[in-house]
Amino acid sequence: MLPGWRRWLFALKISGAALLALGIALWIDLPRPYWAMATVYITMQPLSGATRSKALYRVIGTLIGVTATVVMVPALVNAPEMLTLALALWTAGCLYLSLLDRTPRSYLFMLAGYTAALIGFPAVATPEAIFDIAVSRAEEITLGILCASLVASLVLPEPVGPVLAARVGAWLAEAGRWTGDVLSGVGEAPALRARRLRLAVEAAEIDALSAHLAYDTSAQSRAVPLVQLLRGRMLMLLPVLSSLADRIAALTALSGLTPELRGLLAEVEAWSAQGAPAAGVEALMARIEAADRPLPAHPSWTALVRASLIERLRELVAIGRDCRALQDGIRRGDGSLREPLAYAGEFGGRAPRHRDHGMALRSALGVFLGIVACVTVWIVTAWPDGATAAMMGAVLCCLFAAQDDPVPMILSFALWTGVAVVGVGGLLFGVMPLVHDFISLALVLAPVLILCGLLMSDPKTLPVGLALGINGNALLAIQDRYSAEFGAYVNASLALVGGIGLAAVVTRLVRSVGAEHGARRLVAASRADLARAARRRGRGDRIAFAHLMLDRLGLLVPRLAAAGPDSDLTRIDTLAALRVGMNLVALRRARHGLPPEAVAPLDDVLDAVAAHYDGPRGPASDTVLHRIDAALARIEAAPGGASGHDARRDALLGLVGLRRALFSEAPPPGAALLAREAA
């Protein structure tokens, strides 16, 4: 299939930006103008806002890296071991910070790290010129970044806003289909469940896309606060729908799904199918409130599950209404809302993100050892181009450090760099001697540059395009006059491929873990957070907790898919674990309004849940179930809140939700509740 017009447009823009950078670099007589061309291929993105957001951080990171190099190289050039350690530690430390950040700002740390290696190692032979070299590299790299940003912004820009609005619309449409299936009682096939879990991944992708919105030229650039508010509601919608499906199934098994409830579910389903219009919200909420009955002194299990269902319906309608209002505001692009939000203050905090300090340290260790290995080979063999190997080893270890197993990508990069060596060699020694001015040079380079852009425009071939675009330009090494020499070219090519290969070897030994290992670390981190949530006794922030858990879920789902169907991880109910967390926060809030005699059994439940998640992965023990049932029996007789927030009701519904999340197959609670069930 031939590339579409958008891919051709991106290819033409990136090749044009590269030629513009080359022309300016030659015009102002920069020593290595090809650095500016290669930087364009590192920087430019299909969406103009993404290019600009990264460009700012890349420029700042480059300047920090340049400054660090100017400080380190002159001071340590007579002690190569110390200089190697200093550059390796600097690059590793910056990579560590980059991996913890997970926003466009991470490029600042990464560029600060490997820019020092890019400049420092080649400058070892001429330390007295380090300042001039550093300034030249900063100028060349900054020129490439600015040319990429300029072309992306002025030449038929592809703004982030409309793409983001379309992604939000598609996400809400899929969530609407799930809502319809849940409320109509349709069971979840494995394929359907996997598609629903993709919603967490897509929410994370929308969040990543929204990080570039503030740098966009579209009308939606003013809607950044609305996108942040919407993401919180999108994420909360997942556990609410999962809980609703569970409560409907439980009431069906208890024969407690009365005609009144079925009618209410049908009304909510019809409202959702219409796009959650604001016009019908008040009447629908009135119907939900009318169906909600005060819990008696000794409620039956069916009454408790019914009350929990009503509570989830209330949340579903409120969140659905907010999502539609926020989506309309984002689509208009004026940054305003035409109606108040149901959860006006609860979703306003900063969303926490998952940080894996262990894997970040492992990646930092990988780049440190990779640099040391390359420099060791350089020193032992007295390799004239050993600096290139050390430089490429540092860059490749950094570029793919976020992956569970970077080795396949690094090896692919090495393979296509080898292809670039052959192709560029033919161009350099067969065609370039015939070039005598910039126009003929541009005509010769344009087809190759466009091909690299086409490859980069498709996610499947992006690594190929990067390898050819970055290393191809570096190998071509265009100067203001032709000065290619075959022996030097072969030596530089071997150093380039050798540095990448050595990076792959070190990464295989130190860093590669695989998707299943990454999934297990995410599951372990979630269990540790659930244990902490159960041990703490503060009121907690359920939205912040949901953000963190669902951020992990977005990282976990693709790893579970890559782990394969035979992995025991595929049996994990990730949404049930999230529901456990939400109910733990609800119980912690409720305990502050309960009388002392009701707090003790609730604390016993929290302690038992903490012990479960502190232990090995597996089903919760009967001890947890017995403590939940004992707490239900004690708290059901406790007096309710005097006004407003009813702690007794919240505690009972939290216990119901916790019991259903941990023991969905368990029969209803013991004798006391069963006796009232029969009465």
Image (spheres, helix red, strand yellow):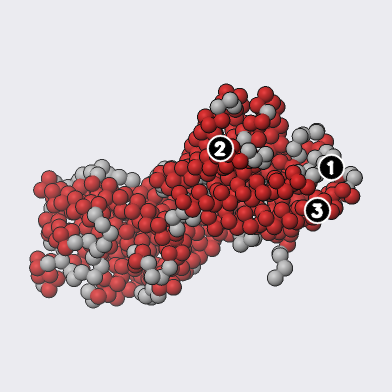
Distance of mark 1 from mark 2, alpha carbons? Answer: 32 Å
Q: Which mark is residue 392?
A: none
Q: Is residue 483 above or below residue 328?
A: above
Image check: 222 left or right of 319?
Answer: right
User: Residue 427 versus residue 624: which sits nearer the camera?
Assistant: 427
Q: Amino acid at mark 2?
A: Gly
Q: Is residue 129 above or below residue 273?
A: above
Q: Check the picture and name the quadrant holding the N terminus.
A: bottom right
For label 3, the residue is: 427
Q: Which mark is residue 113?
A: 2
Choose top left, top right, bottom left or bottom right for residue 192: bottom left
**Residue 235 in sight:** no
Choose top left, top right, bottom left or bottom right for residue 306: bottom left
Q: Amino acid at mark 3?
A: Leu
Image check: 154 left or right of 305?
Answer: right
Residue drawn at the location 83% of the way across and 38% of the way down: 480
Residue drawn at the location 62% of the way across and 35% of the way down: 121
Percent position of residue 2, x then y? 72, 68
- Mark 2: give few (<14), some (14-19) or many (20+) Cα within 10 Å: many
Percent position of residue 288, x then y? 33, 63
Distance of mark 1 from mark 3, alpha carbons? Answer: 12 Å
Q: Is residue 471 above or below residue 671?
A: above
Residue drawn at the location 32% of the way across and 59% of the way down: 577
